[in-house]
């Protein structure tokens, strides 16, 4: 059955194994059986003895159940019932922002907050989300001083669905051109990867960062009043020429 909803699961494959078996495959199983639409699977005409029942393949959309269920058959026509639960494969969605914005201009250190929404986790169990930043233009890891920008959060959900924030902080001075950065997230339980959200084209996972604009260069001259100064210079030249003409004319008169 479904661990979260307790609904029956159809299509999970199980095997019956010798009590000393250590390799659990269809080839090493004594018998195999698949759960029907009521979630029921059966092994019949089993000789007396001890056995292990183990899930070989989960139904579509579910995580595998790797627990061994030990049973002992000691009487004729004995019926032993066991209940096996499977967890749905978790669903992840993310929304990355910088100070709540999708576009940002560098002004020092940068912190990208990626809000990860999840579904179908098991309440009370510990999970870890590990994230890494990607450069959308190259499809490769975004590097700062040659190193990946990574972050991780370990949490224990109280409900199957919820949110957790993964934050990435780095030196903004490495941004020298417009850069689109995408946050990739991977979910782990007990050290095993169980879900990934890694879509380089997902706009929700993406932020756009602009470099700090270069300061304006100081002006060496102001052309706004060029016409005025040219006019003023022309008047000055005209006055000088007039003065010289008058001076030379007066000198000629004195000489006469």
Image (cartoon, helix red, strand yellow):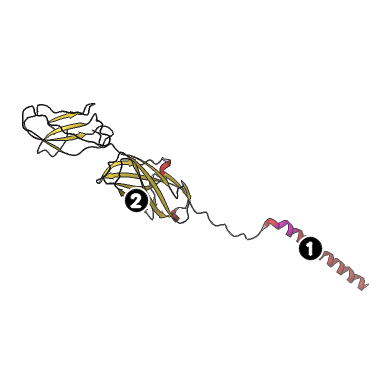
Mark 2 burial class by Cα count in 10 Å: few <14, some 14-19, many 20+: some
Evaluate whether residue 27 shows in this view. no
In the image, taking residue 55 as reference, residue 198 lies left or right, namely right
**In the image, which disc is placed on residue 223?**
none
Residue 40 locus on image (x, y percent): 19, 28
Q: Nearer the viewer, mark 2 or mark 1?
A: 2
Residue 240 locus on image (x, y percent): 81, 65
Front residue (pair 248, 145)? 145
Q: Is residue 233 above or below residue 18?
A: below
Mark 1 burial class by Cα count in 10 Å: few <14, some 14-19, many 20+: few
Q: Secondary structure at mark 1?
A: helix
Q: How many marks?
A: 2
Residue 184 locus on image (x, y percent): 36, 45
Q: Is residue 40 above or below residue 255?
A: above
Chain-order first, disc 2 or disc 1? 2
- Could you tell me which residue is drawn at 68 percent across and 57 percent down? 223
Q: Which residue is mark 1?
A: 237
Please tell me whether the stretch drawn in magenta is mainly helix, strand or loop. helix
Quadrant that contains the C terminus: bottom right
In the image, taking residue 232 as reference, residue 38 lies left or right, namely left
Q: Which residue is mark 2?
A: 151
Q: Is residue 18 above or below residue 180?
A: above
Q: Which residues are magenta?
A: 225-230
Give the residue furthest to the right: 256
- Could you tell me which residue is drawn at 16 percent across and 35 percent down? 54
Whole-angstrom CA distance, mark 2 to mark 1, is 74 Å
Quadrant that contains the N terminus: top left
Front residue (pair 24, 175)? 24
Residue 50 locus on image (x, y percent): 8, 35
């Amino acid at each position: 059955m479904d661990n979260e909803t307790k609904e029956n699961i159809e299509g999970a494959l199980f095997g019956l194994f010798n009590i000393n078996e250590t390799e659990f495959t269809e080839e090493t199983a004594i018998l195999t059986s698949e759960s029907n639409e009521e979630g029921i699977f059966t092994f019949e005409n089993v000789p007396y003895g001890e056995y292990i029942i183990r899930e070989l393949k989960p139904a579509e959309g579910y995580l595998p159940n790797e627990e061994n269920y030990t049973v002992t058959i000691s009487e004729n026509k004995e019926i032993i019932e066991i209940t096996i639960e499977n967890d749905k494969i978790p669903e992840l969605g993310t929304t990355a922002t910088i100070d709540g914005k999708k576009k940002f201009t560098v002004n020092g250190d940068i912190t990208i907050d990626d809000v990860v929404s999840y579904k179908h986790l098991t309440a009370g169990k510990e999970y870890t989300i590990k994230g890494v930043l990607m450069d959308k233009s190259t499809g490769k890891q975004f590097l700062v001083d040659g190193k990946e920008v990574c972050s991780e959060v370990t949490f224990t959900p109280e409900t199957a669905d919820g949110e957790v924030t993964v934050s990435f902080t780095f030196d903004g001075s490495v941004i020298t051109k417009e850069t689109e950065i995408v946050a990739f997230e991977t979910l782990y339980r007990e050290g095993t990867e169980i879900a990934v959200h890694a879509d380089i084209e997902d706009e929700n996972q993406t932020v756009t960062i602009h470099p700090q604009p270069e300061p304006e260069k100081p002006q060496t001259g102001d052309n706004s009043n060029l016409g005025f100064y040219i006019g003023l210079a022309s008047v000055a030249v005209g006055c000088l020429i007039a003065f010289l003409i008058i001076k030379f004319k007066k000198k000629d008169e004195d000489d006469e």
